[in-house]
Amino acid sequence: MKNPEILMGLRVIGRFRKRSHRIGWGGCPMHKQRKNAKILIIEDSETVRIVLAAALRNADYDVIEAADGMTGLMLAERWTPDLAILDLHLPDMPGVEIACLFHQRIPYLVLTMDAEYEQVKKCTDLGALGYLVKPIVIEDVMRYIHIALRRGWENLHLRNALRETQTVCKAVGILMAHQQLSEEAAYQKLVSFATAHRQRLAVVASEVLKEFHDLIGVEKKPVGTARKANKAGGSIAEWFNLPPPPAG
């Protein structure tokens, strides 16, 4: 027989689901665009875990559960969730240690009994997208999760864009130094090659970095690695006067 608290929580979820179907999901289209987001729950309380997982599944999220920190870390590594919900009071390790490992890798919310708890502040400093105070209220939880998912995706896109920009800047700098080009000429060389080969600029920039590493001996490619075909002033390898790969 199920715990009375669990049964009560499931009844609340049922009412919430009916109301959600009537009024829509907060009037926000993001939920419809990413309704199958993957959410990892790391919570040792069976009652909280079951109620929260049921609410999320009813909202069409993919959910996986962990009752302790080590299991949560293994699932996060294997499953790569869009959002983790992390309890700060776990039986095997402090939640803040998991927050340190999630920092800039996995968006997460924290669950706590006390909003003034020092560990909550530490997690916020480590990039937590917010916190939920127990006992949880399903309507509030779903609203926070929706906002956290949106912020998590925005942060991920920003980090990816920054990473690509840094790669392009490094490639431009290498071409400027190696081929005595101006900044504008080096950038245009990358753009021309990317356009001719129908590749993204960041992909071409990454190839420039790899070929430059070959030149200085930092990174060796496997024998027989193919070069880009000549279509815009030779292959990238030829920009650095590297010998062609062996035949076969």
Image (cartoon, rainbow, N blue to C red):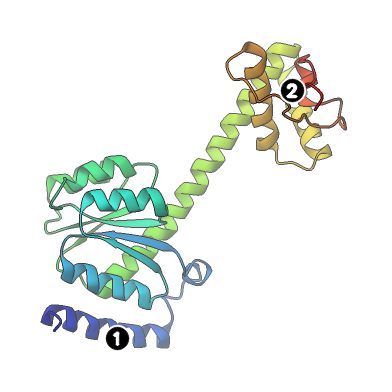
Q: Helix or strand or loop: what does disc 1 sit on?
A: helix
Q: Helix or strand or loop: what does disc 2 sit on?
A: helix
Tag 2 residue? 186
Question: Please, is residue 20 above or below residue 65 in the view?
Answer: below
User: Looking at the rendering, in which quadrant would you find the C terminus?
Assistant: top right
Decide: few, some or many residues near mark 2? Use Cα within 10 Å; few <14, some 14-19, many ≥20. many
Question: Please, is residue 97 above or below residue 239 in the view?
Answer: below
Decide: few, some or many residues near mark 1? Use Cα within 10 Å; few <14, some 14-19, many ≥20. some
Where on the picture, by quarter, is residue 247? top right
Where on the picture, by quarter, is residue 114? bottom left
66 vs 89, left or right, is right
- Residue 7 versus residue 130: which sits nearer the camera? 7
Where on the picture, by quarter, is residue 213? top right
x, y percent for residue 174: 66, 18
Q: Earlier in the sequence, mark 1 or mark 2?
A: 1
Q: CA distance from mark 1 to mark 2?
A: 60 Å
Amino acid marked by disc 2: Ala
Can the viewer see residue 23?
yes
x, y percent for residue 131: 24, 56
Q: Which mark is residue 14?
A: 1
- Residue 184 versus residue 36: which sits nearer the camera? 36
What residue sits 59% from the left and 34% below the top? 165
163 vs 51, left or right, is right
Amino acid marked by disc 1: Gly
x, y percent for residue 135: 14, 68
What residue sits 67% from the left and 36% below the top? 203
x, y percent for residue 147: 38, 62
Can the viewer see residue 171?
no
* Residue situated furthest front in the rendering: 248
What residue sits 21% from the left and 44% below the top? 96
Question: Please, is residue 148 above or below residue 185 in the view?
Answer: below
What residue sits 57% from the left and 16% below the top? 218
